[in-house]
Amino acid sequence: MKKQWWHGKVAYQIYPKSFKDTNQDGVGDLRGVIEKLDYLKNLGVDILWLSPIYCSPLADQGYDISDYYNIDPRFGTMEDMDELIAEAKKRDMYILMDLVVNHCSDEHQWFQKAMEDPEGEFGKYFYIEKGRNGKPPSNLRSYFGGSVWERIGETDQYYLHLFHKKQPDLNWENPVVRKEIYSMINWWLEKGIAGFRIDAIINIKKALPFHDYEPDREDGLASCGKMLEEAKGVIDFLKEMKEETFQKYNAFTVGEVFNEKPEELPDFIGEDGCFSSMFDFRETIFGSSEKGWYDSQPIMPDDYRNCCFESQKRVEGIGFLCNIIENHDEPRGVSRYIPKGECSDASKKLLATLYFMLKGLPFIYQGQEIGMENVPFRSIADIDDISTLDEYKVALEQGISEKEAFEIACRYSRDNARVPFQWSSDKNAGFTQGSPWLMVNPEYEKLNLELQKEDPDSVFQYYKKLIALRKSEVYKDTFVYGALEPVYTEFERVMAYYRKGKDQDILVIGNFQTESRRIELPEKAAKVLLNNDDTVSWEDGYLCLNGYQAVVLELERSR
Ligand code: TEU
Ligand code: CA
């Protein structure tokens, strides 16, 4: 496998709006990121993915961009951005921007001009279709609920938005649009960013002409996924984009790709793929339903394990995944993947160990390193997220009680990840001295970075050890390039795998339950490289693990 500059790195996702506020307006900002660069460097992370900070009306918290070439004043200035890039470079850290080009904001000048003259040049930047007898051109449902078609004034014309109506889809079939996008990408790469996380990118290829699909809910609409299954040729756009931009700068790119077809993997993340990597979302979408969150099934530890290993298998010999337990679109990983009532420092460290040592580039989402959990929202009024509010409505429309619909909304809400980072026990968890844009988790006085910096057994200190081990001179090649071989997959509530490299055989093993257990090891452990418990005990060749104990062992190699 051709070595790449990013192969041994560890990445960290920052949601700037909730990271650190330095001008006390209650909104996180770029100066807050600059202020925390040394913290992040000391943690051991190398690559920083910033969720969008471009000009935006924030209808979808910045994923609705009204000017790709400017920083939204709420987050700071272009000078702040230039300073962040320079300060990161000084620390051998790399900045990824969020590339949101399936759609822009309806407040972007392109769309404003299109609305002035839908038949004109800018109308062709979007999908504008005639209605059918006073109804929308087709029956697709937006990811955020309702039709994907928004009527233009009193005309019988509609524009397409797979997401929010303030996020009109850009027409990638129009070469002028693609050229505009590539110029913008190169402009940012010229400024010295190291690459992009690429938002919702599979949506850019539509199945044309637009037509109806079999409804999948009583609303008579059908999920966008139905169209994506049919769309052919997204790879042509993606390859052109890579050739026109990324590859000129040896940029790192990670695609946000859901529901990819297995045969597409080599084109996506192979040696000459259009992305450097893509996120593993298998665990994220496990148990989800077209009907909505109310119909989702919980993911249990063995499901989690099987999803991780299935993803690893699918990309084996093809390319690298980026591994996560959470992001800004998901609930907190420790609240999702650890069974209710079993969330503890030990189980948080176990989950950290098991995902972090998988093959691929690990991403940490802000606050994950201190074990931030889902938020005890008090009522639906605490929730800001448009996706959550839609799902709450969908549940109510199914006749589900307000109490249960609220519980479901809280369980899966993106706002679990979007409340302010918990820096300290100071007011507002040290995030702002102003009034925070979204509530602070009321548990912050018991769970914050300041407390954990002082505690050698904290989740934070464990993440530091985990990162240091993965990047250590002696073992990094095995963790980066070593083969991943699942083991004990027939055991319930055990997740274990080998990492077999040129120089070492390593076993990563976690007892994913509260009860202790003994496991017979075929090989002898030469060294305990990491342990989330005080000791590791052995009895007659059996490894004895306490509840939620995880260990990383270097095994003796048979001569
Ligand atoms: O998410 C794409 C995507 O698939 C989302 O619709 C996801 O399924 C949803 O957020 C789950 O509730 C990207 C961004 O990560 C997300 O924050 C944006 O809302 C979305 O694109 C539109 O840009
Ligand atoms: Ca601010």
Image (cartoon, helix red, strand yellow):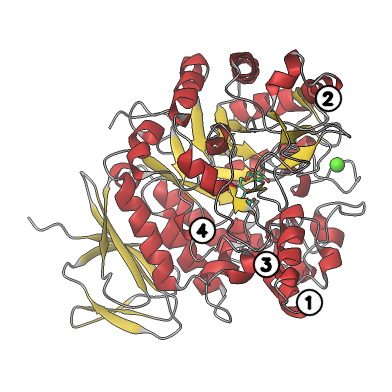
The earlier-in-sequence mark between 2 and 1 is: 2
The response on whether ligand 1 sits within 8 Å of label 1 is: no
The earlier-in-sequence mark between 1 and 3 is: 3
Depth-wise, is mark 1 or mark 3 nearer the camera? Answer: 1
The earlier-in-sequence mark between 3 and 2 is: 2
Q: Are marks 1 and 4 in contact (CB under 8 Å)?
A: no
Q: Is residue 394 left or right of residue 355?
A: right
Pick the residue in front: 458 or 180: 180
Quadrant assignment, res 491:
bottom left
Quadrant assignment, res 66:
top right
What separation in Å lies between label 3 and label 2 (alpha carbons)?
Answer: 41 Å
Residue that carries the numbered disc 2 in the rendered image: 115
Give the amino acid type for the residue marked by disc 2 in the picture. Answer: Met
Give the amino acid type for the residue marked by disc 1 in the picture. Answer: Glu
Residue that carries the numbered disc 4 in the rendered image: 285
Q: Is residue 486 above or below residue 224?
A: below
Residue that carries the numbered disc 3 in the rendered image: 374
Q: Are marks 1 and 3 in contact (CB under 8 Å)?
A: no
Q: Are marks 4 and 2 in contact (CB under 8 Å)?
A: no
**Mark 2 surroundings within 10 Å by alpha-carbon count, few (fewer than 14), some (14 through 19), many (20 or more):** some
Q: Is residue 184 left or right of residue 22?
A: left
Q: Is residue 380 left or right of residue 172?
A: right
What separation in Å lies between label 1 and label 4 (alpha carbons)?
Answer: 25 Å
Image x and y of residue 426, in percent: 84, 61
Image x and y of residue 437, in percent: 86, 52
Secondary structure type for disc 4 = helix
